[in-house]
Image (tube, helix red, strand yellow):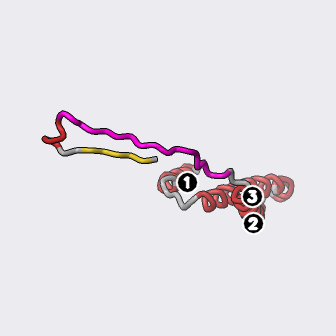
């Protein structure tokens, strides 16, 4: 169990800085949530058969099948979620930011030769 947790933590540390875009992150997170929930539900439904036969493979089968079903459902929800977010995206702000900020060092412009202008 400790090895598994360490592997998951190390994998998460390497995956967190990676950003593939808003849509990809939405689909990936929804798929991961579905995978985890499906594995948990599959393992919970395997408790009754396990208590009858005391075979640990029942948990693996229940968790595995639940994880696959949950990942499929999570992928479907993730695709829907990405489409919903794309359709209901608020319009980008394009306000009337017409102006200039001029920064000049008038008393030292001969020395530095610096004049900065930022337009919005």
Which mark is drawn over residue 8? Answer: 1
Picture coordinates of residue 36, whole percent (x, y): 70, 55
Q: Quadrant of residue 61?
A: bottom right
Pointers 3 and 2 in contact (C-beta within 8 Å): no
Q: In this figure, which residue is indicated by the disc labeled 2?
A: 72
Estimate how packed mark 2 is, as few (under 14), some (14 to 19) or many (20 or more) residues with alpha carbons within 10 Å: some
Q: Secondary structure at mark 1?
A: helix
Q: Which residues are drawn in magenta?
A: 91-107
Q: Residue at x 65, y 55 (%)?
A: 29
- As drawn, the residue found furthest toward the left would be 111
- First in sequence: mark 1 vs mark 3: 1
Q: Residue at x 41, y 43 (%)?
A: 100
Q: In this figure, which residue is indicated by the disc labeled 3?
A: 84
Pointers 1 and 3 in contact (C-beta within 8 Å): no
Q: Secondary structure at mark 2?
A: helix
Q: Is residue 103 visible?
A: yes
Q: Residue at x 52, y 44 (%)?
A: 97
- As drawn, the residue found furthest toward the top would be 107
Picture coordinates of residue 120, whole percent (x, y): 46, 47
For marks 3 and 2, give the one nearer the viewer.
3
> Mark 1 to mark 3: distance in Å?
30 Å
Is residue 25 in the magenta section?
Answer: no
Viewed as shown, does residue 28 lie left or right of 68?
A: left
> Mark 1 to mark 2: distance in Å?
21 Å
Q: Secondary structure at mark 3?
A: helix
Estimate how packed mark 3 is, as few (under 14), some (14 to 19) or many (20 or more) residues with alpha carbons within 10 Å: few
């Amino acid at each position: 169990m400790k090895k598994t947790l360490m592997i998951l933590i190390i994998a998460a540390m390497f995956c967190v800085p990676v950003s593939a875009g808003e849509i990809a992150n939405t689909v990936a997170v929804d798929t991961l949530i579905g995978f985890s929930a499906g594995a948990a539900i599959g393992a919970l439904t395997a408790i009754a058969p396990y208590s009858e036969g005391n075979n640990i493979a029942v948990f693996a089968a229940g968790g595995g099948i639940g994880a696959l079903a949950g990942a499929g459902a999570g992928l479907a929800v993730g695709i829907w979620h990405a489409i919903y977010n794309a359709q209901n995206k608020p319009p980008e702000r394009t306000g009337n930011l017409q102006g200039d900020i001029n920064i000049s060092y008038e008393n030292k412009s001969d020395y530095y030769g610096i004049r900065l202008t930022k337009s919005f």
